Image (cartoon, rainbow, N blue to C red):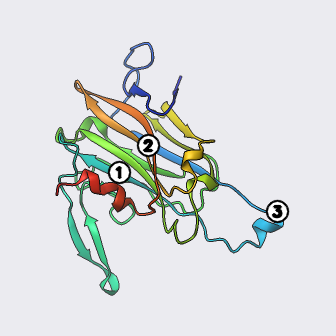
Amino acid sequence: MAINLQKGQTIDLRKNNLGESVYDLSQVTIGLGWDVRKQGGFFGRLFSNEPEYDLDAVAFLLDKNGKVADMGRTLHGHNGKQVVLYESDVIYFNSMRHPSGHIWLTGDNRTGEGDGDDEQIIVKLDQLNERYQKIIFVVSIYRGRTNRQHFGMIDNAFIRAVDARGKEITKYSLSGDSSINGMCSMVFAEAYRHHGDWKFRAIGDPYSTDNFIDVLVPYTYK
């Protein structure tokens, strides 16, 4: 049975609450989900001009010093647009697959509609190079400040871990927390190595910024 975590709580990703090794970490799905709180009833929703909520899942791969060692490169794309952090140790909407091939983002859901995960980050924990000691999972509301959108307007936000056989290992739900009002980014959770295995910690630290780069700064080398 999956364990429902509270903020700050940590579990072993491979073992159940009896200490038995039951989960397959050869490929773990980190699923994130949310529902946008609807305003104004049916007609309010039908004729609303409110911009869609675009929540972006991001992962930082950290070394033994708790820093992102490889910041990748800047790619000059179409129409001269620059893509920074390309093929780096940061997985996000403009660089969805890590160069190792062992961690990737499946897509970008811009509505939060429907059941189940709205975005997924897949990671092959058993194959991830030893130089990566921790993975930080972040969600940011794209243009949240401009559109006056924040986590206080979102219901049923969660992060969960599912093993290679489809077994849900753990889930951390975020609801009814007044501290997230006005906040546009969230460090949801982290997975980290501990004595040769992987643990998962629910964090739930909110940030007012809607740009995940601001959240990234403390994890970079100066």
SS under mark 3:
helix
Query: Considering the image in quadrants, where does the C terminus appear?
Result: bottom left
Q: Relative to residue 121, is residue 148 drawn left or right?
A: right
Does residue 61 sit above or below 97 in this rendering?
above
Mark 1 touching mark 2, by CB under 8 A?
yes
Residue that numbered label 3 is attached to = 42
- Circle 1: is it few (<14), some (14-19), or many (20+) Cα within 10 Å? many
Residue 84 visible in the displayed image: yes
Give me the residue at 60% from left, 52% from top: 152
SS under mark 2:
strand
**Badge 1 amino acid:** Ala
Q: Nearer the viewer, residue 165 or 13?
A: 13
**Badge 2 amino acid:** Ile
Q: Which mark is residue 83?
A: none
Residue 117 visible in the displayed image: no
Q: Which mark is residue 30?
A: 2
Who comes first in sequence, dot 3 or dot 1?
3
Does residue 178 sit above or below 52 in this rendering?
above
Q: Nearer the viewer, residue 166 or 219?
A: 219
Residue 197: horizontal and vertical position, in percent? 27, 27
Residue that numbered label 1 is attached to = 59
Does residue 142 sit above or below 20 in this rendering?
below
Gap in angstroms between the C-alphas marked 3 and 1 = 36 Å
